[in-house]
Amino acid sequence: MEISPNSMASATSAGSATANNPVLASDFETFLKMLTAQAKYQDPLEPIDSSEYAAQLAQFSMVEQQVLSNDLLGALTAQLGSGNMAQMANWIGMEARTTAPVQFDGSPVTITPNPAAVSDEVFLVVYDSDGQEVQRTSIPVSADPIEWAGVSDDGTPFDAGLYSFEVESRANGELLLADPAETYARITEARTQGGETLLILEGGSAVLASSVSGLREAA
C-alpha cells in the first residue's frame, strides 16, 4: 500500500478545514491507520525513502496538534460560557431596563422616555400584546422617568398582561421621532442561546443581555 505526499497533504488540509468538528478526530484516526498500513506493507526491496517518511511524520504531528488545539479551544469556550452564565445568574431577581414588552399586574410601570430636544409636544403611546394602540397620553418634554398607572382615560384599569410603549416627539404638529420607550421589568431566568446570554423577564419577554441599558434592585 502506498501513500503519496500529495494524498497525505490532502488529508491534512481536510482535517484543518473541519476544525472544531468531530470529523477532524475521525480523520486523525484514519491518518494513523493509513500511516501504519504503509509501514507494514512497504516493499522490503524498495523501502520508504527516509525524507518522505519524515515528511509524513511531520504531517502526522500537525494533525495531532490541530486536534489538541481544537480540544483546548472547546474547553476554553465552555469555561468562558459558564463564567458568563454565573455572572448573569446574579441578575436574576433584579429589574432590567429594556424596550421589551413589560408585564402589567396592576402596579405602576416605570417608563424612561427620551424625546427629541427640539420637540414642543410629546406623547406616550401604549400598545397591548397584540400590537394594538390602547392609549395615547401627553407627557412632559423631558427625559425624567414617569409612572404609567395602567388606567384608561375613563378611569377603568387595564387588564393584566404585556404592554409596550412608544414615545412620539412632535414639533409644530409634525412627527419628528417615534422611539420605543424603555421600561423596568424583573429578570426571572438567564439562559444561553446561539452563544449569547438571553434574559427572560417577568411575563415571558426575552431580551439579549447586551441590550439591557440599566439594572436596579427590584422594588
Image: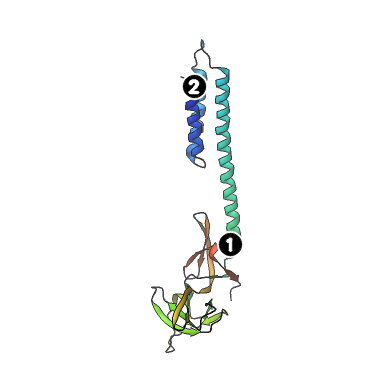
Can see residue 209? no
Circle 1 crowding by C-alpha within 10 Å: few under 14, some 14–19, many from 20: some
> Between residues 19 and 86, which one lies in front from this camera angle?
19
Where on the picture, by quarter, is residue 173? bottom left
Residue positioned 61% across, 60% down in the render: 87
Residue positioned 57% across, 32% down in the render: 62
Question: What residue is disc 1 on?
Answer: 89
Percent x, y for residue 112?
Answer: 54, 76
Kind of residue sitting beneath label 2: Ala
Percent x, y for residue 206?
Answer: 48, 65
Kind of residue sitting beneath label 1: Ala
**How many dots with numbers?**
2
When the figure is inspected, residue 45 is found, relative to residue 124, above or below; the finding is above
Can see residue 42? yes
When the figure is inspected, residue 196 is found, relative to residue 106, above or below; the finding is above
Where on the picture, by quarter, is residue 159? bottom left
Percent x, y for residue 207?
Answer: 50, 65
Residue 37 bears which disc, if any?
Answer: 2
Percent x, y for residue 11?
Answer: 48, 31
Between the C-alphas of marks 2 and 1, the distance is 53 Å
**How is the model colour-coded?**
rainbow
Residue 107 bears which disc, if any?
Answer: none
When the figure is inspected, residue 15 is found, relative to residue 156, above or below; the finding is above
When the figure is inspected, residue 64 is found, relative to residue 72, above or below; the finding is above
Most extreme residue toward the top is 45
Circle 2 crowding by C-alpha within 10 Å: few under 14, some 14–19, many from 20: some
Most extreme residue toward the bottom is 154
Depth-wise, is mark 2 or mark 1 nearer the camera? 2
Q: Which type of secondary structure does the marked residue at label 1 adopt?
A: helix
Image quarter of the C terminus? bottom right
- Left or right: 161 with respect to 215? left
Please report whichever mark, 2 or 1, sits nearer to the chain's N-terminal start.
2
